[in-house]
Amino acid sequence: MTEFFDDLETRSADKREAALFSGMPDLIAHAKAKSSGWAKQLDGIDPKSVTDRDGLAKLPVFRKSMVGELQKSNPPFGGFASVEPGEFTRIFMSPGPIWEPQRQGGDPWNAHRPLYAAGFRKGDIVHNSLSYHMTPGGFIFDSALVQMGCAVFPAGVGNTGMQVAAISELKPSGYTGTPDYLKVILDHANEESLDISSLKRASVGGGALPESLREWYGERGIFVTQTYATAELGVVAYESEAVEGMIINEDYIVEIVKPGTGELAASGEVGEMVVTILDRAYPLIRFATGDLTAVLPGDSPCGRTNMRIKGWMGRADQRTKVKGMFIDPAQVAEILKRHPDIAKLRLIVGRAGEQDTMVVRAECNQPNDALSEALAATVQSVCKVRGQIELVQTGSLPCDGKVIADERSYD
């Protein structure tokens, strides 16, 4: 029988939405008053107007790709923290470099529900092979496991031989780390004839978990679930024992938008994940992660009622250089705005005769020469690059979130 961490996981959608948005106006007012970055980002926004998803969707997105430059000009957090840097528990450095504050509390990355859904319980010994060095990876699971009453072996990364030896002696029942490194550990143990069969469950993240690898673990008696987490947000979504999509974690508001825009994607359409977290010290409002996903309709068979997503489906940041000019998804969105009779657009970049080529494939119900000529002119005007126009029937393009497909090969 399914167990839940608490009653919040099974509440109705109406109750969840009401709880999430009840504090939104106050959070926005607080962010604007206490942080110069949010004051500028949300200039002209009336906090009282943001009481539901429709109001939230009118706010500008705050792109992860912007964070590095903003932090350089106003270190360490770009003006987006509402407290002084010394008031955070820890400060990490992610690649970029980007400074990441650890919020207050025993489980600041909200990992307890995902770990509980994965089967971790009080009294478990857990082998954690995520990095504790400079980045928050190791601490994300470590903090939650300690709060849950588990004992953690902070293995970190590398030293596979020592990690295998530790597992063979400590006999942990759980593993947290990347999906592929667990296989490295199992293979090494097999080579050394060490017994690590105590491992029965794993919660993984930071990489892809192909079904073939999940099945391989299952054949060895290890039940594996995966999470979607970022250093800024914590664990946004996770799998349960049902292993049907990833369930949005409580206390997060997730939107799926068309790449390069803040406009909501149609239900089931692949788009960029935008997340809002209601934290007063380091608020993130419509934070565009740069990752693609899509909503999975219905509730999980496990009984949890929050929205589900299909998991990580690629990167939304498709910015590509063509003939010396960068083309951004936002430019594709601008082309679409100028041609409302076009349903969907994709720029396909290739190579021919050692030169870049660009095909503009556009969906429309009534292809004609006038539309083709007008679209070609708009593409050149917006992108500063000529493109070959191909008008196709509505529904012809893949529903994968791509608006720029770079198919060049330099072999």
Image: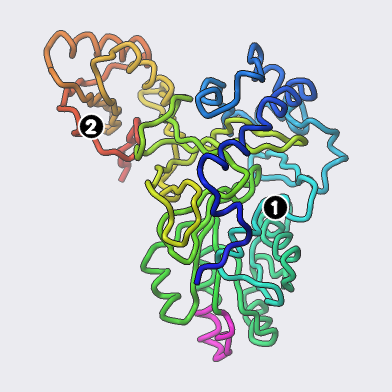
- Who's the residue at 68% across and 76% down the image? 124
Picture quadrant of residue 175: bottom right
Q: Amino acid at mark 1?
A: Pro
* Left or right: residue 22 compared with residue 342: right
- Who's the residue at 70% across and 51% down the image? 135
Q: Residue furthest right?
A: 86
What is the magenta range? 186-199
Q: Is residue 190 magenta?
A: yes
* Residue 298: percent from left, percent from top: 39, 49
Q: Nearer the viewer, residue 204 or 145?
A: 145
* Residue 411: percent from left, percent from top: 30, 46
User: CA gap, disc 1 to disc 2?
Assistant: 44 Å
Q: Identify residue for label 1.
A: 136
* Residue 149: percent from left, percent from top: 74, 70
SS class, disc 2: strand
Q: Amino acid at mark 2?
A: Ala
Q: Earlier in the sequence, mark 1 or mark 2?
A: 1
Discs 1, 2 touching: Cβ within 8 Å: no
- Who's the residue at 61% across and 67% down the image? 176
Give the number of the disc on residue 61. none
Picture quadrant of residue 74: top right
Task: Answer few, some or many: residues within 10 Å of disc 1's Cα (few below 14, many 20 plus, some between 14 and 19).
Answer: many
Q: Identify residue for label 2.
A: 352
SS class, disc 1: loop
* Left or right: residue 129 compared with residue 264: right
Above or below: residue 287 compared with residue 388: below
